[in-house]
Image: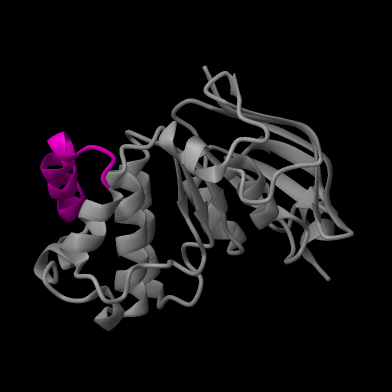
Amino acid sequence: MTTLELDGVHTYYGESHILQGLSLSVEEGEIVALVGRNGVGKTTTLRTALGLTPPREGTVRFDGTDVTGMEPHEIAARGMGWVPEERRVFSHLTVAENLRVAAHSAADSDARIAEAYELFPALDRFSDKEAGDLSGGQQQMLAIARGMVGDNDLLLVDEPSEGLAPQIVEDVVEALRAASADTTMVLVEQNFRLAMDLADRFYLVDHGVVVEEGETAGVTSEDERIRRYLTA
């Protein structure tokens, strides 16, 4: 089953034409990576899917439903979660409070929070600590955990390794891999090797369109079809 489909979307910031007829699809259970240079439209693709920057042309479908033009909160309520690059935790709420706020249903929030703590033991240890006092890596873990607690069918994850120490990146990658057992993911990641290691398939974006796509197995940044779009 196709979880997410963008068909010929054109998205603008003001008069700046960012996505120029971009099309892609994500199947249920996949991790799909969006890769490419900075500024080519990867984050805008996530924002377009969630309705934060809706397209002027084209169609967005989520779980078979046309959600083009819906408000972001309406799309989120259907089960699409977002882990933004800036993390955006509630700094004056505790870890536990951040997770409870993210839960769609109070009925099963305890069970899902317990699952998040299993994946992120550090969050369990600091459950009573204000999120603003966490390290950058711990805040990233909290941002991912909030997406999981929301019981989302699809999680949009933007630059999860940005600014993190290598050991923390390993922890975050393992947590994303574990979370993908229950949640389809679209991943924007500047670290090409990490993206290929984590994802099942990739789309290479350049100037607002998909220029290459395929399975990630065996793909490296030295492949000629890839390298010319990653180097300045």
Q: Main secondary structure of the magenta part?
A: helix
In the rendered view, tell whether residue 95 sits above or below residue 5.
Answer: below
Whether 108 is among the magenta residues is yes
Q: Quadrant of the C terminus?
A: bottom right
In this rendering, the count of numbered labels is 0
Residue 75 in the image, given as x and y percentages of width and height = 51, 36
**In which quadrant of the rendered view does residue 130 lie?**
bottom left
In the rendered view, tell whether residue 23 sits above or below residue 37.
Answer: above
Q: Is residue 119 left or right of residue 29?
A: left
Query: Considering depth in this image, is 108 or 134 the residue closer to the camera?
Result: 108
Evaluate whether residue 54 shows in this view.
Answer: yes
**In which quadrant of the rendered view does residue 135 lie?**
bottom left
Query: Considering depth in this image, is 60 or 231 the residue closer to the camera?
Result: 60
- Identified at 16% across, 55% down, the residue is 117
- Identified at 76% across, 49% down, the residue is 205
- Identified at 12% across, 40% down, the residue is 111
Query: Considering depth in this image, is 91 or 142 the residue closer to the camera?
Result: 91
Q: Which residues are magenta?
A: 103-119
Coloring scheme of the render? one colour
**In which quadrant of the rendered view does residue 144 lie?**
bottom left
